[in-house]
Amino acid sequence: MASGSVPRRMLGRRLKQLREKAGVSQAAACRAIEIAPQTLWRIETGQPGPKLKDIYVETLGRLYAVSETEIAELVKLVAETKNSGWWYAYSDVVPPDFDVYLGMEESARTMTSLQLTLVPGLLQTTNYRRAVIWAGFPGMSTAEVERRIQIQANRQGRLMEPPEQFTVTMFVGEAALRYPVGGQSVMQEQRFHLLEVARLPTVTVRVVPMTIEMPVALVAGSFVLLDFPPHATERLSEPPVVYIEGYTGALYLDKPGEIDRYNQTCRAIHTMALNEEKSREFILDITKENQ
């Protein structure tokens, strides 16, 4: 069952499409259900926060001249938005931006990631993750760090799912394999872990060496492209999303032109990165260098 964040996005996107198709202004929609413009914006963009009610959807659906059948479909989504993901138990240590991402990651069918300087989160060892957290938040308490590490461990459970439910392709920059995050002993453990996790049927690890002339990766920077399974009602299907994590916030890109651009980037990286066998040899070579 999907967590509430993805159904919330589905519902908001569809309500916005229907409002614009009907030629109803934002002000008129706000008056109809007696909410502020900012609240409508948050609903239509799938932001967490506003309490969604069946009566809101029913009223807006009739205002937009939507069929009773589709109104019923949208009301079902309202119920789905109330599903809580496992990470809600860690809400005290999950940043708001990352809460949205966790819901998407949990619902995704495939993930393609380019990480130039750090090992991708789903492939990090406990010791590596601990070093990354303390580097970013040196004053964080040990208890909070350990709770964040538990979140990481729970996320990695998806790697054990059947490949028809979830697969990841991780393009990892050479720098991420060489930076001594946490010291060389932590990095050696991390490199061995990469070799092991790459054997899973759900995981593809491909290295992007510094020697490859590949400016597109440097220009694009690190990102995650998430694709979702189709919804039973096609018009409600969640489109792909690009997630870009920043030091103080995050970006979520889902416009068709943006997704096309990142799909092109993924194809270019796929062509130029080392294949799986050569990537394994590359990681082994770096591991031997640091023994």
Image: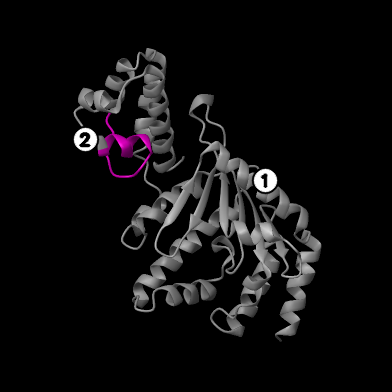
Q: Residue 36, which numbered label?
A: 2
| Image coords of residue 8 (percent x, y) | 39, 37
Instruction: Identify the image quadrant of residue 22.
Output: top left
| Image coords of residue 273 (percent x, y) | 75, 59
Magenta residues span: 38-53
Tell me if residue 51 can be seen.
no
Residue 212 vertical position relative to residue 13 in the rendered view, above or below = below
Q: Residue 158, which numbered label?
A: none
**Residue positioned 44% across, 61% down in the render:** 151
> Helix, strand or loop at disc 1?
helix
Mark 2 nearby-residue class (10 Å; few <14, some 14–19, many ≥20): few
- Asked if the stretch drawn in magenta spans residue 191, the answer is no
| Residue at the spot of label 1 | 264
Q: Nearer the viewer, residue 19 or 1?
A: 19
Residue 138 vertical position relative to residue 154 in the rendered view, above or below = below
Say how the picture is coloured: one colour
The reply to whether the C-beta atoms of the residues labelled 2 and 1 are less than 8 Å apart is no
> Helix, strand or loop at disc 2?
loop
Tell me if residue 44 can be seen.
yes
| Image coords of residue 267 (percent x, y) | 71, 48
Q: Nearer the viewer, residue 152 or 258?
A: 258
Alpha-carbon span between mark 2 and mark 1: 39 Å
Instruction: Identify the image quadrant of residue 178.
Output: bottom right
**Residue positioned 35% across, 71% down in the render:** 144
Q: Relative to residue 56, is residue 10 drawn left or right?
A: right
